């Protein structure tokens, strides 16, 4: 299904995870924002580009319906879906009179929701296609997230003639510009003065074009400017970039900071990078558990083991797979010389060590993201429950 951007209204805390997981189980769905106050719905729709507003009417439908009517009238492009426990014909009729397109009764029927979302996607099929958002996050600090994000962006650019951008969301310590040896005048910080929707021209001024063709949006030049950046700013910038690029690769957010959930909710793929050491595997395990609790779709998560074959102290990617009960999407070999030579001269691996195994591994991941049905060179290994680390959890 093509991308469908959803704004969620839900004032029932105990229903949050269920609603999120139901929506995110559809591959094109991106949750651009979640609000729990009827009064801020209209403001949120101004701030975040959305195709559908999915509103939970419970527990007090009478309080929510008038707001939905206002939204339906003032935002003709946004379709409104209502969700409720109630099967009361009068309420359903009232909802329809208030401009609501779909009324979904709890528990939401997957087919009914899938059909409704499919119709929205179809109605938007003539719009400019949205690019794919690939986030790269580290299961711990220093595991190689920046190295993988930067090189993945460069490899994706080689696979597509359309635009590819890489965005540094490590607002304080980000090194994307250093890895690619560029010196930005304007950065993410300059896009965060204005809280309303961004024009692409504003973003264009802040993008630096690398010789590979990848456009770079860097972290703020001044350390303290990071304080002014909010999750809403990040979602706004990324949404605008997705309208102009085939791929937007994001380095970060780091350490699961405040904006992480908002960015992951609009991502198509999340590369979760880890190294073969117990503390990192444990952190990833906790992270995955936490994400499942809040209704995140783990199918979008891609585990990447970095520095494989180095001094791993006995843990293998197979152990990681079995412990986390999740397939490993990519294995990047350990190659200190190639990686550090590239970083120190500020070049991607495709320029400084094109034949290195580490470059080939990242290129392989880019190819599989770009064309999941392409030629498979290696049989995926099925995850089995258990494994040598299971006893530590
Ligand atoms: N495959 C690899 N082989 C050898 N060294 C690597 C590899 N990947 C990354 N490194 C090294 O690990 C160090 C950290 O890499 P990088 O900055 O990409 O990690 P990070 O996860 O972004 O760190 P941070 O948490 O500080 O943002 C660098 O010195 C880099 O050279
Ligand atoms: Mg980094």
Image (tube, rainbow, N blue to C red):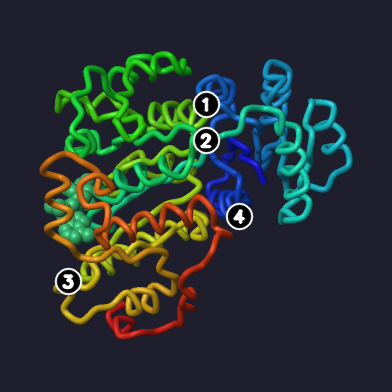
Badge nearest the viewer, 2 or 3: 3
Residue in view at x 54 percent, y 64 percent = 375
Q: Earlier in the sequence, mark 4 or mark 3?
A: 4
Crowd rating for badge 4 (residues with CA inside 10 Å; few <14, some 14–19, many 20+):
some
- The image quadrant that residue 73 belongs to is top right
Residue in view at x 29 percent, y 30 percent = 210
Q: Are marks 2 and 1 in contact (CB under 8 Å)?
A: yes
For the question of whether residue 182 can be seen, the reply is yes
Report helix, strand or loop for mark 2.
Answer: strand
Task: State the residue position of label 3.
Answer: 310
Badge nearest the viewer, 3 or 1: 3
Task: State the residue position of label 4.
Answer: 25
Measure the C-alpha gap from mark 2 to mark 3.
Answer: 40 Å
As drawn, 180 above or below 107: above
Measure the C-alpha gap from mark 4 to mark 1.
Answer: 21 Å
Task: State the residue position of label 1.
Answer: 48
Q: Are marks 4 and 2 in contact (CB under 8 Å)?
A: no
Q: Are marks 3 and 1 in contact (CB under 8 Å)?
A: no
């Amino acid at each position: 299904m093509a991308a469908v951007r959803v704004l969620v209204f839900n004032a029932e805390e105990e229903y949050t995870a269920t609603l999120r997981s139901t929506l995110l189980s559809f591959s094109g769905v991106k949750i651009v924002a979640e609000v729990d106050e009827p009064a801020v719905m209209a403001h949120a729709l101004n701030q975040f580009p959305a195709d559908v507003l999915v509103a939970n009417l419970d527990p007090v439908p009478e309080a929510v319906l008038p707001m939905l009517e206002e939204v339906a009238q003032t935002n003709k492009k946004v379709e409104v879906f209502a969700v409720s426990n109630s099967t009361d014909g009068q309420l359903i009729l009232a909802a329809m009179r208030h401009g609501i397109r779909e009324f979904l009764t709890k528990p939401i029927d997957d087919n009914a929701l899938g059909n409704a979302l499919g119709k929205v996607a179809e109605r938007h099929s003539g719009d400019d296609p949205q690019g794919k958002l690939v986030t790269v996050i580290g299961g711990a600090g220093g595991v190689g997230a920046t190295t993988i994000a930067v090189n993945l962006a460069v490899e994706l650019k080689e696979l597509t003639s359309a635009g590819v951008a890489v965005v540094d969301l490590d607002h304080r310590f980000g090194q994307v510009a250093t890895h690619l040896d560029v010196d930005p005048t304007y950065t993410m910080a300059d896009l965060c003065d204005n809280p309303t929707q961004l024009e692409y021209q504003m973003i264009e001024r802040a993008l630096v074009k690398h010789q590979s063709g990848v456009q770079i949006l860097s972290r703020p030049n001044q350390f303290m400017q990071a304080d002014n950046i909010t999750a809403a700013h990040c979602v706004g910038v990324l949404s605008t970039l997705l309208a102009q690029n085939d791929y937007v690769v994001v380095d970060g957010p780091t350490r699961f900071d405040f904006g992480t959930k908002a960015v992951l909710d609009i991502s198509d793929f999340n590369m979760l990078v880890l190294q073969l050491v117990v503390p990192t595997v444990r952190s990833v395990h906790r992270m995955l558990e936490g994400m499942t609790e809040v209704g995140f779709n783990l199918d979008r998560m891609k585990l990447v083991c970095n520095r494989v074959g180095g001094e791993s102290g006995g843990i293998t990617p197979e152990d990681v797979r079995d412990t986390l009960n999740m397939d490993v999407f990519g294995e990047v070999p350990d190659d200190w010389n190639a990686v550090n030579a590239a970083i120190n001269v500020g070049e991607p691996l495709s320029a400084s060590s094109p034949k290195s195994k580490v470059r080939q591994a990242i290129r392989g991941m880019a190819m599989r993201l770009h064309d999941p049905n392409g030629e498979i060179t290696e049989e995926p290994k099925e995850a089995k429950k258990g494994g040598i680390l299971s006893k530590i959890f």
